[in-house]
Amino acid sequence: MIDLLVGGMYGDEGKGKIASYMSLQDKPRYALRTGSVNAGHTIVYEGKKLGLRIVPAAFLNRSTKILLPPGCLIRLDVLFKEMEETGIRDRLGIDANTAVITEKEVEEEKQNAFLSKEVGSTVQGVGAAESKRILRKLALAKDYKELKDYICNVPLLVTEAMEKGEYAIAEGSQGHLLSLYHGHYPYVTSRNTSSSGILSEIGISPKHVGEITLVFKAFTTRVGGGPLEGELSEQEAEKLGYVEFGTVTGRRRRAAPLDLDMGREICRVNGATQIAITKLDYIFKDAHKKRRYSELSKEAQRWVENVEHRMKARVAFIGTGEEVFDIIDMRKEK
Ligand code: GTP
Ligand code: MG
């Protein structure tokens, strides 16, 4: 069985934190990460903060093998740096067909004013590399001798594990509303970020999917251009404490309250079997670092129940702080 983690809105919901918690708790055989270097997953574990752009956050479990699937795009400098930081050299596999972004694609995107100014792209070369791959002009992982020790067949390895009844986690990146196909085009990223996109990037059958967890933050943020329903002014956002800065770009994120009707629709089309809500402690300060549902104030509990009711989705995880274990695991509460 493979569990999917999908960003509910515009990304930065805290998928990294949920993935790292699940890896320590549920001990997957494999952890996979789709997407590319334009999305940063931040994890805070044992007092250390780590921003990851390629390695899945679920690497935290030392017995978990790390796989980079054919549909993801890597950059060699970022990969080798993160391999060093995470110590996963001996448990890493990269599919032969994984795409490799070079400095050239980054430069090309920098020159593209529509992308960098209007769309508000992070200009990491992902779209340029992806378009070259479509034109069959991009070198893939199998073409780089530096990667030869890691090359494997990811769809086959995962399928074999599924056939043996093993467990895996796949992390999506960004969120449903930034999907190339399902977001507000052209204010989107260069890939399909929904649950179906995660599967096609890995290249395995939908029949192996277990839980589909849509991750929502207690409020919504967005970087770059494009519509944001219910957008707050900077002052209003500050008053409510909805202030965040991007991991990759350092830009201040635009903010809005969580739109529950939109959330319900997104859960339906992604086939959510459960949801995670992160940063409850931003809305209810007294929720900070709580690990049991009963320790939340009545007001916070009512807020969570309302989300569950309106989104018509079971809440499996509630984030209450930055650290991996600052979480209420509702699967254990029942
Ligand atoms: P993308 O792939 O870019 O969408 O990344 P992401 O969804 O993993 O989110 P990102 O890592 O960009 O941002 C999450 C940040 O919020 C990290 O610094 C986390 O430590 C922090 N965080 C996650 N959950 C919680 C929470 O429940 N409360 C608090 N206070 N911080 C949290
Ligand atoms: Mg992020």
Image (cartoon, rainbow, N blue to C red):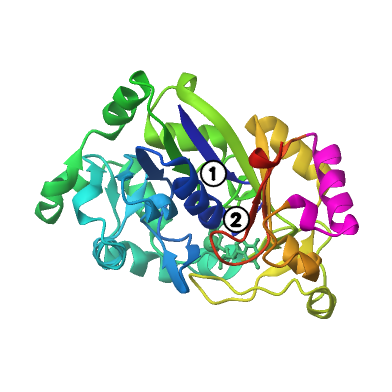
Residue drawn 87% across and 45% down? 306
**How many discs mark residues in the rendered view?**
2
Q: Can you give x and y, in whole percent of width and height, for residue 22 in the image? A: 51, 46
State if disc 1 and disc 2 touch (CB < 8 Å): yes
Please tell me whether mark 2 sits on a helix, a strand or a loop: loop
Residue drawn 60% across and 74% down? 245
Q: Can you give x and y, in whole percent of width and height, for residue 31 in the image? A: 38, 43
Residue drawn 81% across and 49% down? 304
Q: Which mark is residue 193?
A: 1
Q: Residues within 10 Å of mark 1 (few under 14, many from 20)?
A: many
Please tell me whether mark 1 sits on a helix, a strand or a loop: loop
Q: Can you give x and y, in whole percent of width and height, for residue 16 in the image? A: 51, 56
Residue 289: quadrant of the picture: bottom right
Tell me if residue 304 is in the magenta stretch: yes
Q: Nearer the viewer, residue 191 or 5?
A: 5
The residue where tag 2 is placed is: 11
Ligand 1 within 8 Å, label 2 CB: yes
**Left-right relation of 96 to 65:** left
Dominant SS of magenta comes to: helix
- Asked whether residue 182 appears in the rendered view, the answer is no
Q: Which residues are magenta?
A: 293-312
Residue drawn 23% across and 33% down? 153
**Reading the chain from its start, which is encountered first: label 2 or label 1?**
2
Q: Amino acid at mark 1?
A: Thr
